[in-house]
Amino acid sequence: MDKLVVHGGSPLRGSVNISGSKNASLPILAAAILSGEDCIIRRVPDVSDTNYMIQILSALGADVERSSGTVRITCADISDEAPYELVRRMRASICVMGPLLARKGRAVVSLPGGCVIGDRPVDLHLRGLEALGAKVEFEGGNIILTAPDGLRGAEIDLRGSNGPTVLGTDNVMMAATLAEGITVIESAAAEPEVLDLANFLNAMGAKIEGAGTRRITIEGVKELRGVEHTVIPDRIEAGTFMAAAALAGEGVTLNRICREHLKAITEQIIKSGHRVEFNAEGDSCTVYRGEELRGCEISTSPYPGYPTDMQAQMTALLVTTPGISLIKDTIFPQRFMHCSELKRMGADIKVDNGTAIIRGVEKLSAAPVMASDLRASAALVLAALTAKGSTEISRLYHIDRGYEHIDEKLLTLGAAVERVKG
Protein backbone atom coordinates (compact mmCIF):
# COMPACT_ATOMS: atom_id res chain seq x y z
CA MET A 1 0.00 0.00 0.00
CA ASP A 2 1.54 3.30 -1.10
CA LYS A 3 2.57 6.01 1.35
CA LEU A 4 3.49 9.62 0.74
CA VAL A 5 6.50 11.05 2.53
CA VAL A 6 6.53 14.84 2.72
CA HIS A 7 9.75 16.55 3.80
CA GLY A 8 8.59 19.85 5.25
CA GLY A 9 10.15 23.24 4.70
CA SER A 10 10.55 23.48 0.93
CA PRO A 11 8.84 26.62 -0.42
CA LEU A 12 6.40 26.28 -3.34
CA ARG A 13 6.79 28.42 -6.44
CA GLY A 14 5.92 28.21 -10.13
CA SER A 15 2.67 27.18 -11.80
CA VAL A 16 0.36 24.18 -11.89
CA ASN A 17 -2.46 23.12 -14.23
CA ILE A 18 -5.72 22.17 -12.52
CA SER A 19 -7.35 18.97 -13.77
CA GLY A 20 -10.91 18.46 -14.95
CA SER A 21 -13.52 18.04 -12.23
CA LYS A 22 -13.85 14.56 -10.72
CA ASN A 23 -17.32 15.34 -9.38
CA ALA A 24 -18.51 16.56 -12.78
CA SER A 25 -16.86 13.69 -14.70
CA LEU A 26 -18.58 10.87 -12.80
CA PRO A 27 -22.24 11.69 -13.66
CA ILE A 28 -21.24 12.81 -17.18
CA LEU A 29 -19.58 9.43 -17.80
CA ALA A 30 -22.75 7.74 -16.47
CA ALA A 31 -24.95 9.93 -18.70
CA ALA A 32 -23.36 8.37 -21.79
CA ILE A 33 -25.64 5.39 -21.01
CA LEU A 34 -28.58 7.50 -22.25
CA SER A 35 -27.45 7.30 -25.89
CA GLY A 36 -26.43 4.44 -28.13
CA GLU A 37 -24.08 6.74 -30.04
CA ASP A 38 -20.45 7.74 -29.42
CA CYS A 39 -19.82 10.24 -26.60
CA ILE A 40 -16.37 11.84 -26.36
CA ILE A 41 -15.57 13.44 -22.99
CA ARG A 42 -12.40 15.48 -22.58
CA ARG A 43 -10.39 16.47 -19.49
CA VAL A 44 -11.55 13.49 -17.45
CA PRO A 45 -9.03 13.31 -14.57
CA ASP A 46 -6.94 10.16 -14.17
CA VAL A 47 -8.09 9.27 -10.64
CA SER A 48 -9.32 6.00 -9.18
CA ASP A 49 -12.96 7.18 -8.96
CA THR A 50 -13.18 7.88 -12.71
CA ASN A 51 -11.37 4.60 -13.37
CA TYR A 52 -14.02 2.75 -11.32
CA MET A 53 -16.81 4.46 -13.27
CA ILE A 54 -15.18 3.45 -16.56
CA GLN A 55 -14.91 -0.14 -15.27
CA ILE A 56 -18.60 -0.09 -14.32
CA LEU A 57 -19.57 1.14 -17.81
CA SER A 58 -17.40 -1.58 -19.38
CA ALA A 59 -18.99 -4.22 -17.14
CA LEU A 60 -22.43 -3.00 -18.29
CA GLY A 61 -21.36 -3.70 -21.87
CA ALA A 62 -20.26 -0.25 -23.02
CA ASP A 63 -17.37 0.07 -25.46
CA VAL A 64 -14.91 2.42 -23.70
CA GLU A 65 -11.56 3.80 -24.85
CA ARG A 66 -9.37 6.06 -22.74
CA SER A 67 -6.46 8.07 -24.06
CA SER A 68 -4.80 10.50 -21.64
CA GLY A 69 -7.64 12.81 -20.56
CA THR A 70 -10.13 11.83 -23.28
CA VAL A 71 -12.73 9.06 -22.88
CA ARG A 72 -14.84 7.72 -25.75
CA ILE A 73 -17.94 5.73 -24.72
CA THR A 74 -20.43 3.86 -26.89
CA CYS A 75 -23.40 2.29 -25.09
CA ALA A 76 -25.05 0.58 -28.07
CA ASP A 77 -26.00 -2.56 -26.15
CA ILE A 78 -25.82 -2.52 -22.36
CA SER A 79 -26.96 -4.60 -19.41
CA ASP A 80 -29.20 -3.16 -16.70
CA GLU A 81 -27.28 -4.67 -13.75
CA ALA A 82 -24.25 -2.88 -12.24
CA PRO A 83 -21.84 -5.33 -10.56
CA TYR A 84 -21.48 -5.22 -6.77
CA GLU A 85 -17.69 -5.71 -6.85
CA LEU A 86 -17.26 -2.35 -8.58
CA VAL A 87 -20.18 -0.39 -7.13
CA ARG A 88 -19.14 -1.09 -3.53
CA ARG A 89 -15.85 0.78 -4.06
CA MET A 90 -17.36 4.15 -4.88
CA ARG A 91 -20.49 5.86 -3.63
CA ALA A 92 -20.87 7.98 -6.79
CA SER A 93 -21.52 4.80 -8.80
CA ILE A 94 -25.14 5.24 -7.67
CA CYS A 95 -25.49 7.79 -10.48
CA VAL A 96 -25.76 5.01 -13.09
CA MET A 97 -29.21 4.28 -11.61
CA GLY A 98 -31.11 7.14 -13.30
CA PRO A 99 -29.71 6.71 -16.83
CA LEU A 100 -30.04 2.89 -16.72
CA LEU A 101 -33.67 3.17 -15.64
CA ALA A 102 -34.45 5.71 -18.37
CA ARG A 103 -32.66 3.76 -21.12
CA LYS A 104 -33.56 0.18 -20.17
CA GLY A 105 -36.70 0.51 -18.04
CA ARG A 106 -34.89 -1.40 -15.29
CA ALA A 107 -31.82 -0.86 -13.12
CA VAL A 108 -30.20 -3.14 -10.57
CA VAL A 109 -27.54 -1.35 -8.52
CA SER A 110 -25.92 -2.45 -5.26
CA LEU A 111 -26.25 -0.18 -2.28
CA PRO A 112 -23.00 1.77 -2.59
CA GLY A 113 -19.98 1.78 -0.34
CA GLY A 114 -17.45 4.60 -0.46
CA CYS A 115 -16.87 7.31 2.10
CA VAL A 116 -16.72 7.20 5.87
CA ILE A 117 -17.58 10.88 6.36
CA GLY A 118 -21.10 10.32 7.57
CA ASP A 119 -24.37 8.72 6.56
CA ARG A 120 -25.39 9.72 3.04
CA PRO A 121 -28.57 7.77 2.32
CA VAL A 122 -29.94 7.29 -1.18
CA ASP A 123 -33.56 7.81 -0.11
CA LEU A 124 -33.76 11.17 -1.91
CA HIS A 125 -32.62 9.54 -5.16
CA LEU A 126 -35.27 6.86 -4.78
CA ARG A 127 -37.98 9.35 -3.83
CA GLY A 128 -37.28 11.30 -7.00
CA LEU A 129 -37.22 8.22 -9.26
CA GLU A 130 -40.42 6.86 -7.65
CA ALA A 131 -42.13 10.18 -8.44
CA LEU A 132 -41.20 9.59 -12.10
CA GLY A 133 -42.99 6.22 -12.00
CA ALA A 134 -40.28 3.80 -10.89
CA LYS A 135 -41.06 0.84 -8.66
CA VAL A 136 -38.38 0.34 -5.98
CA GLU A 137 -37.49 -3.02 -4.38
CA PHE A 138 -34.57 -4.18 -2.24
CA GLU A 139 -33.14 -7.67 -2.54
CA GLY A 140 -29.80 -9.14 -1.47
CA GLY A 141 -28.19 -5.75 -0.94
CA ASN A 142 -29.38 -4.51 -4.33
CA ILE A 143 -31.75 -1.73 -5.29
CA ILE A 144 -34.02 -2.99 -8.08
CA LEU A 145 -35.79 -0.24 -10.04
CA THR A 146 -38.36 -0.96 -12.70
CA ALA A 147 -40.57 1.29 -14.80
CA PRO A 148 -43.17 -1.09 -16.26
CA ASP A 149 -45.28 1.76 -17.65
CA GLY A 150 -42.32 3.98 -18.56
CA LEU A 151 -41.22 7.17 -16.79
CA ARG A 152 -43.52 10.20 -16.65
CA GLY A 153 -42.74 13.79 -15.73
CA ALA A 154 -43.57 14.96 -12.20
CA GLU A 155 -42.93 17.73 -9.68
CA ILE A 156 -40.28 16.58 -7.24
CA ASP A 157 -38.85 18.22 -4.12
CA LEU A 158 -35.34 16.96 -3.34
CA ARG A 159 -34.87 18.90 -0.09
CA GLY A 160 -32.88 16.87 2.42
CA SER A 161 -32.03 17.40 6.09
CA ASN A 162 -28.49 18.54 5.18
CA GLY A 163 -29.39 20.55 2.10
CA PRO A 164 -29.84 19.56 -1.54
CA THR A 165 -28.41 16.31 -2.89
CA VAL A 166 -26.01 16.72 -5.80
CA LEU A 167 -26.00 13.10 -7.01
CA GLY A 168 -29.74 12.85 -6.33
CA THR A 169 -30.33 15.90 -8.54
CA ASP A 170 -28.07 14.32 -11.19
CA ASN A 171 -29.90 10.99 -11.08
CA VAL A 172 -33.39 12.46 -11.35
CA MET A 173 -32.34 14.94 -14.06
CA MET A 174 -30.80 12.16 -16.17
CA ALA A 175 -33.84 9.90 -15.78
CA ALA A 176 -36.23 12.76 -16.61
CA THR A 177 -34.54 13.52 -19.95
CA LEU A 178 -36.24 10.46 -21.49
CA ALA A 179 -39.44 10.60 -19.39
CA GLU A 180 -42.76 11.50 -21.01
CA GLY A 181 -43.82 15.08 -20.23
CA ILE A 182 -42.31 17.76 -18.02
CA THR A 183 -40.39 17.25 -14.77
CA VAL A 184 -39.75 20.04 -12.28
CA ILE A 185 -37.08 19.51 -9.60
CA GLU A 186 -37.49 21.84 -6.63
CA SER A 187 -34.71 22.25 -4.04
CA ALA A 188 -32.26 21.07 -6.69
CA ALA A 189 -28.52 21.22 -6.07
CA ALA A 190 -27.04 24.32 -7.76
CA GLU A 191 -23.40 23.20 -7.88
CA PRO A 192 -21.35 23.91 -11.04
CA GLU A 193 -21.01 20.15 -11.53
CA VAL A 194 -24.81 19.84 -11.90
CA LEU A 195 -24.79 22.62 -14.50
CA ASP A 196 -21.95 20.89 -16.38
CA LEU A 197 -24.00 17.68 -16.52
CA ALA A 198 -27.03 19.63 -17.77
CA ASN A 199 -24.90 21.25 -20.49
CA PHE A 200 -23.72 17.78 -21.55
CA LEU A 201 -27.31 16.46 -21.63
CA ASN A 202 -28.58 19.49 -23.56
CA ALA A 203 -25.83 18.98 -26.14
CA MET A 204 -27.14 15.39 -26.48
CA GLY A 205 -30.59 16.79 -27.28
CA ALA A 206 -32.19 17.05 -23.83
CA LYS A 207 -34.38 20.03 -22.95
CA ILE A 208 -33.24 21.24 -19.51
CA GLU A 209 -33.68 24.75 -18.11
CA GLY A 210 -32.68 26.22 -14.75
CA ALA A 211 -29.65 24.03 -14.00
CA GLY A 212 -27.39 25.90 -11.60
CA THR A 213 -30.45 27.18 -9.70
CA ARG A 214 -32.72 25.58 -7.10
CA ARG A 215 -35.44 24.88 -9.71
CA ILE A 216 -34.73 22.74 -12.76
CA THR A 217 -37.27 22.02 -15.51
CA ILE A 218 -36.81 19.07 -17.87
CA GLU A 219 -38.98 18.40 -20.90
CA GLY A 220 -38.65 14.75 -21.87
CA VAL A 221 -37.47 13.77 -25.36
CA LYS A 222 -37.64 10.47 -27.27
CA GLU A 223 -33.90 9.89 -27.64
CA LEU A 224 -30.49 11.44 -27.11
CA ARG A 225 -27.51 11.55 -29.46
CA GLY A 226 -23.76 11.27 -28.98
CA VAL A 227 -21.72 14.44 -28.38
CA GLU A 228 -18.27 15.80 -27.52
CA HIS A 229 -17.84 17.65 -24.22
CA THR A 230 -15.03 19.16 -22.13
CA VAL A 231 -15.37 18.82 -18.35
CA ILE A 232 -15.15 21.96 -16.17
CA PRO A 233 -12.06 22.54 -13.97
CA ASP A 234 -11.98 20.89 -10.54
CA ARG A 235 -12.76 23.68 -8.07
CA ILE A 236 -11.80 21.51 -5.06
CA GLU A 237 -8.39 20.67 -6.51
CA ALA A 238 -7.97 24.39 -7.29
CA GLY A 239 -8.94 25.29 -3.72
CA THR A 240 -6.52 22.70 -2.34
CA PHE A 241 -3.61 24.20 -4.30
CA MET A 242 -4.70 27.71 -3.26
CA ALA A 243 -4.43 26.55 0.38
CA ALA A 244 -1.04 24.91 -0.34
CA ALA A 245 0.21 28.18 -1.88
CA ALA A 246 -1.04 30.18 1.11
CA LEU A 247 0.67 27.78 3.51
CA ALA A 248 4.02 27.27 1.85
CA GLY A 249 4.14 29.37 -1.30
CA GLU A 250 6.28 32.18 -2.62
CA GLY A 251 3.85 33.05 -5.42
CA VAL A 252 2.10 30.05 -6.99
CA THR A 253 0.05 30.35 -10.18
CA LEU A 254 -2.93 28.09 -10.86
CA ASN A 255 -3.96 27.66 -14.49
CA ARG A 256 -7.15 26.16 -15.97
CA ILE A 257 -9.48 27.36 -13.22
CA CYS A 258 -12.85 29.12 -13.12
CA ARG A 259 -12.90 32.22 -10.91
CA GLU A 260 -16.70 32.15 -10.58
CA HIS A 261 -16.61 28.66 -9.03
CA LEU A 262 -13.95 29.69 -6.48
CA LYS A 263 -15.63 32.74 -4.93
CA ALA A 264 -16.35 31.27 -1.48
CA ILE A 265 -12.91 29.62 -1.22
CA THR A 266 -11.08 32.75 -2.42
CA GLU A 267 -12.96 34.88 0.10
CA GLN A 268 -11.77 32.77 3.05
CA ILE A 269 -8.15 32.59 1.80
CA ILE A 270 -8.14 36.41 1.61
CA LYS A 271 -9.90 36.78 5.00
CA SER A 272 -7.12 34.78 6.65
CA GLY A 273 -4.59 37.31 5.35
CA HIS A 274 -3.34 35.96 2.02
CA ARG A 275 -3.40 37.57 -1.43
CA VAL A 276 -5.10 36.15 -4.54
CA GLU A 277 -4.77 37.82 -7.96
CA PHE A 278 -6.81 36.63 -10.95
CA ASN A 279 -6.14 37.37 -14.60
CA ALA A 280 -8.77 39.25 -16.66
CA GLU A 281 -10.27 36.04 -18.07
CA GLY A 282 -10.65 34.47 -14.62
CA ASP A 283 -9.00 31.23 -15.76
CA SER A 284 -5.73 31.76 -13.88
CA CYS A 285 -4.73 33.14 -10.48
CA THR A 286 -1.60 33.64 -8.39
CA VAL A 287 -1.65 33.13 -4.63
CA TYR A 288 0.82 34.90 -2.34
CA ARG A 289 1.34 33.99 1.31
CA GLY A 290 0.31 36.91 3.51
CA GLU A 291 2.41 38.88 5.98
CA GLU A 292 -0.26 39.53 8.61
CA LEU A 293 -2.28 36.36 9.10
CA ARG A 294 -5.47 36.08 11.14
CA GLY A 295 -7.97 33.44 12.18
CA CYS A 296 -11.40 33.32 10.61
CA GLU A 297 -14.85 31.74 10.93
CA ILE A 298 -16.12 29.35 8.27
CA SER A 299 -19.45 27.57 7.99
CA THR A 300 -19.94 25.09 5.16
CA SER A 301 -23.12 25.25 3.10
CA PRO A 302 -24.37 24.18 -0.33
CA TYR A 303 -23.07 26.08 -3.37
CA PRO A 304 -22.53 29.01 -3.69
CA GLY A 305 -21.54 28.74 -0.01
CA TYR A 306 -18.24 27.41 1.33
CA PRO A 307 -17.86 23.76 0.21
CA THR A 308 -17.66 20.93 2.74
CA ASP A 309 -15.06 19.36 0.41
CA MET A 310 -12.68 22.24 1.29
CA GLN A 311 -13.26 22.13 5.04
CA ALA A 312 -10.34 19.83 5.91
CA GLN A 313 -7.83 21.68 3.72
CA MET A 314 -8.77 25.03 5.29
CA THR A 315 -8.38 23.46 8.73
CA ALA A 316 -4.80 22.54 7.75
CA LEU A 317 -4.14 26.14 6.70
CA LEU A 318 -5.60 27.60 9.88
CA VAL A 319 -3.75 25.40 12.40
CA THR A 320 -0.62 27.55 11.94
CA THR A 321 -2.53 30.82 11.51
CA PRO A 322 -2.31 33.11 14.59
CA GLY A 323 -5.46 33.56 16.65
CA ILE A 324 -8.61 31.48 17.01
CA SER A 325 -10.53 30.07 14.04
CA LEU A 326 -13.89 28.32 14.00
CA ILE A 327 -14.97 25.86 11.31
CA LYS A 328 -18.51 24.49 11.37
CA ASP A 329 -19.54 21.76 8.93
CA THR A 330 -23.31 21.88 8.46
CA ILE A 331 -23.27 19.30 5.63
CA PHE A 332 -21.29 16.49 7.29
CA PRO A 333 -20.91 17.31 11.02
CA GLN A 334 -18.84 14.13 11.55
CA ARG A 335 -16.27 15.11 8.94
CA PHE A 336 -13.43 15.97 11.33
CA MET A 337 -11.35 12.79 11.49
CA HIS A 338 -8.37 14.68 10.07
CA CYS A 339 -8.27 16.76 13.25
CA SER A 340 -6.98 13.92 15.45
CA GLU A 341 -4.18 13.33 12.93
CA LEU A 342 -3.33 17.05 12.78
CA LYS A 343 -3.16 17.03 16.60
CA ARG A 344 -0.50 14.30 16.34
CA MET A 345 1.53 16.89 14.41
CA GLY A 346 1.10 19.48 17.16
CA ALA A 347 -2.12 21.26 16.13
CA ASP A 348 -4.36 22.72 18.85
CA ILE A 349 -7.89 21.72 17.78
CA LYS A 350 -11.00 20.91 19.76
CA VAL A 351 -13.94 19.39 17.92
CA ASP A 352 -17.37 19.79 19.46
CA ASN A 353 -20.73 19.06 17.88
CA GLY A 354 -19.77 19.60 14.24
CA THR A 355 -17.48 22.57 14.96
CA ALA A 356 -13.67 22.69 15.10
CA ILE A 357 -12.14 25.33 17.39
CA ILE A 358 -8.58 25.97 16.22
CA ARG A 359 -5.93 27.87 18.16
CA GLY A 360 -3.08 28.68 15.81
CA VAL A 361 0.32 27.26 16.75
CA GLU A 362 3.65 28.55 15.47
CA LYS A 363 4.84 25.30 13.90
CA LEU A 364 3.81 21.70 13.29
CA SER A 365 6.21 18.78 13.62
CA ALA A 366 6.31 15.70 11.44
CA ALA A 367 4.57 12.52 12.58
CA PRO A 368 3.30 9.32 10.97
CA VAL A 369 -0.36 9.99 10.12
CA MET A 370 -3.18 8.11 8.43
CA ALA A 371 -5.67 9.36 5.85
CA SER A 372 -9.31 8.58 6.66
CA ASP A 373 -10.99 9.95 3.53
CA LEU A 374 -10.23 11.85 0.34
CA ARG A 375 -10.22 15.44 1.60
CA ALA A 376 -8.70 14.53 4.99
CA SER A 377 -5.71 13.07 3.15
CA ALA A 378 -5.27 16.33 1.23
CA ALA A 379 -5.32 18.25 4.53
CA LEU A 380 -2.52 16.06 5.92
CA VAL A 381 -0.39 16.66 2.83
CA LEU A 382 -0.90 20.43 3.19
CA ALA A 383 -0.01 20.40 6.89
CA ALA A 384 3.12 18.35 6.17
CA LEU A 385 4.44 20.92 3.67
CA THR A 386 5.52 23.26 6.48
CA ALA A 387 5.94 20.77 9.36
CA LYS A 388 9.42 20.29 10.79
CA GLY A 389 10.81 16.97 9.60
CA SER A 390 9.41 14.23 7.33
CA THR A 391 5.74 13.28 7.59
CA GLU A 392 4.68 9.83 6.44
CA ILE A 393 1.05 9.66 5.26
CA SER A 394 -0.42 6.16 4.91
CA ARG A 395 -3.59 4.99 3.14
CA LEU A 396 -2.66 7.05 0.11
CA TYR A 397 -5.38 5.33 -1.94
CA HIS A 398 -7.81 7.87 -0.44
CA ILE A 399 -6.05 10.80 -2.10
CA ASP A 400 -5.75 8.91 -5.39
CA ARG A 401 -9.56 8.78 -5.53
CA GLY A 402 -9.82 12.47 -6.35
CA TYR A 403 -6.47 14.16 -7.03
CA GLU A 404 -4.72 13.56 -10.33
CA HIS A 405 -0.99 12.98 -9.76
CA ILE A 406 -0.90 15.28 -6.70
CA ASP A 407 2.64 14.18 -5.79
CA GLU A 408 3.94 15.02 -9.28
CA LYS A 409 2.20 18.41 -9.26
CA LEU A 410 3.69 19.28 -5.87
CA LEU A 411 7.14 18.21 -7.10
CA THR A 412 6.91 20.61 -10.04
CA LEU A 413 6.19 23.40 -7.52
CA GLY A 414 9.31 22.55 -5.53
CA ALA A 415 7.84 20.44 -2.70
CA ALA A 416 9.98 17.61 -1.36
CA VAL A 417 7.55 14.68 -1.64
CA GLU A 418 8.02 11.03 -2.54
CA ARG A 419 5.64 8.14 -3.02
CA VAL A 420 6.95 4.94 -1.44
CA LYS A 421 5.63 1.40 -1.44
CA GLY A 422 4.27 0.39 1.95
Image (tube, rainbow, N blue to C red):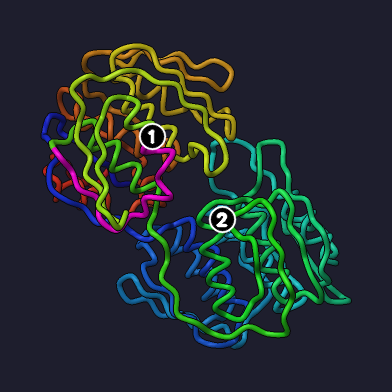
Q: Residues within 10 Å of mark 2 (few under 14, many from 20)?
A: many
Is residue 155 within the magenta segment?
A: no
Q: Is residue 152 above or below residue 161?
A: below
Question: Residue 211: percent from the left, percent from the top?
Answer: 61, 60
Task: Name the residue: 49% across, 69% down.
Answer: 55
Report the quarter where the C terminus lies: top left
Residue 420 in the image: above or below residue 192: above
Observer-nearest of 191 and 281: 281
The reply, left or right, for residue 35 in relation to residue 348 is right
User: Which amino acid, by three-letter code, is at mark 1?
Assistant: Glu
Left or right of 254, for residue 98 = right
Residue 137's spot in the image, x, y percent?
83, 59
Q: Which residues are magenta?
A: 251-267
Please tell me in which quadrant of the rendered image residue 20 appears: bottom left
* x and y percentages locating residue 95 in the rendered image: 62, 61
| Tag 2 residue | 92
Between residues 413 and 143, which one lies in front from this camera angle? 413
Q: Quadrant of residue 365?
A: top left
Q: Amino acid at mark 2?
A: Ala
Q: Label 1: how many residues lie within 10 Å, few (<14), some (14-19) or many (20+)?
A: few
Q: Which one is earlier in the sequence, the residue at label 1 or at label 2?
A: 2
The residue tagged 1 is 267
Q: Position of residue 294 (x, y in %)?
A: 31, 18
Q: Is residue 418 above or below residue 168?
A: above
Examine the structure image and report whether residue 255 is included in the region drawn in magenta: yes
Which residue is more in the foreground, 110 or 94? 94
Q: Give the label on residue 132, or none.
A: none
Quarter-of-image position of residue 4: top left
Q: Residue at x 85, y 67 (%)?
A: 133
Q: Residue at x 30, y 72 (%)?
A: 68
Q: Residue at 52% of width from left, 20% of height from top?
A: 355
Mark 1 against mark 2, which lies toward the viewer?
1
